[in-house]
Image (cartoon, rainbow, N blue to C red):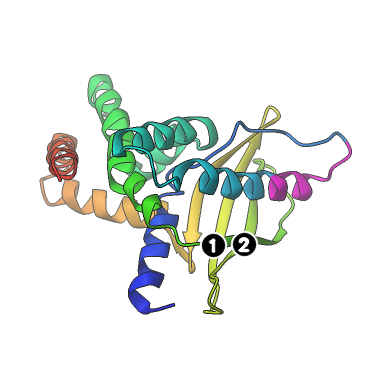
Amino acid sequence: MRMIERHLVIQALRGLLVAVLFAVSSGSATATASETTSNFVKSLGDRAIQVLTVKDITPDERANRFRRLLRESFDVERIARFVLGRYARGAAADAIKEYNQLFKDLIVVTYASRFAQYSGQSFTIKRATEPTPRGDSIVLSEIVATDGSPPIRVDWQVSSTKGRNRIVDVRVEGVSMSVTQREEFSTVIRQNGGDINALLSALRKKTASLNSK
């Protein structure tokens, strides 16, 4: 795979941090915890490919599908809280509410269209760790190209609570998407004297700009 194509695949996968898939299942009663989370992620990847890479749908329909799968399969509120970090403390309730919505909107407008660039890659699940006391597991996987290029490593952090699995982070080639986003947002707030409203303004402008393209 040429470097630009590999880059596009990685960018699309970051959208999976950001949102992907199927109605969540807790797996069979006899499955181990690691098997359950592995099956969840495999279904996640397969379903994302099925519903998001269709060529003959409009950009709006692709975005709507992406948003629906994001809501079903990712703990977006937990991700958003982590990304905002210490700046969530003391922020007004209406600011947090707007931030959560802008965070979701930015994910959708940034990544949904990239699934149209899919060119036949497939998921291979390697293994999964047993859950921590908090209920989180890591599912190690690879994205395999059709041309024999080196696979792309993708690790999924899955939260399993009350019989439901949801993604709370995705690490692409060892880079946490949540940590990366946290660093970007923190920089904006820090450069504006710790004012969360500066971040909200930046998110509004960025989302509007991407929507206009």
Q: Nearer the viewer, residue 51 or 83?
A: 51
Does the magenta-highlighted stretch encompass residue 153?
Answer: no
| The magenta segment | 30-39
Q: Find residue 205 and report its horizontal and vertical position in percent.
A: 12, 40
Query: What main secondary structure does the magenta stretch of the protein show?
Result: helix
Q: As drawn, is 74 to the left or to the right of 136?
A: left
Q: Is residue 30 above or below residue 5?
A: above
Which SS class for mark 2?
Answer: strand
Q: Nearer the viewer, residue 191 or 184?
A: 184
Type of the residue with mark 2: Ser
Which SS class for mark 1?
Answer: strand
Q: Nearer the viewer, residue 133 or 172?
A: 172
Outermost residue on the right side: it is 30
Q: Find residue 89 and report its horizontal and vertical position in percent.
A: 31, 33
Query: Measuring 26% from the left and 33% from the top, which residue is drawn there?
Result: 102
Q: Quarter of the image holding residue 54?
A: top left
Query: Measuring 71% from the left and 56% from the top, which residue is drawn there?
Result: 129
Query: Measuring 19% from the left and 37% from the top, which residue is drawn there?
Result: 196
Does the magenta-highlighted stretch encompass residue 34?
Answer: yes
Type of the residue with mark 1: Val
Q: Which residue is mark 2?
A: 141
Outermost residue on the front side: it is 56
| Whether residue 25 is visible | yes
Q: Which residue is mark 1?
A: 154
Quadrant of the snapshot with the N terminus: bottom left
Q: Earlier in the sequence, mark 1 or mark 2?
A: 2
Q: As drawn, is 155 to the left or to the right of 81?
A: right
Q: Find residue 209 and report its horizontal and vertical position in percent.
A: 13, 43
Q: As drawn, is 66 to the left or to the right of 140?
A: left
Q: Is residue 111 above or below residue 65?
A: below
Q: Quarter of the image holding residue 162?
A: top right
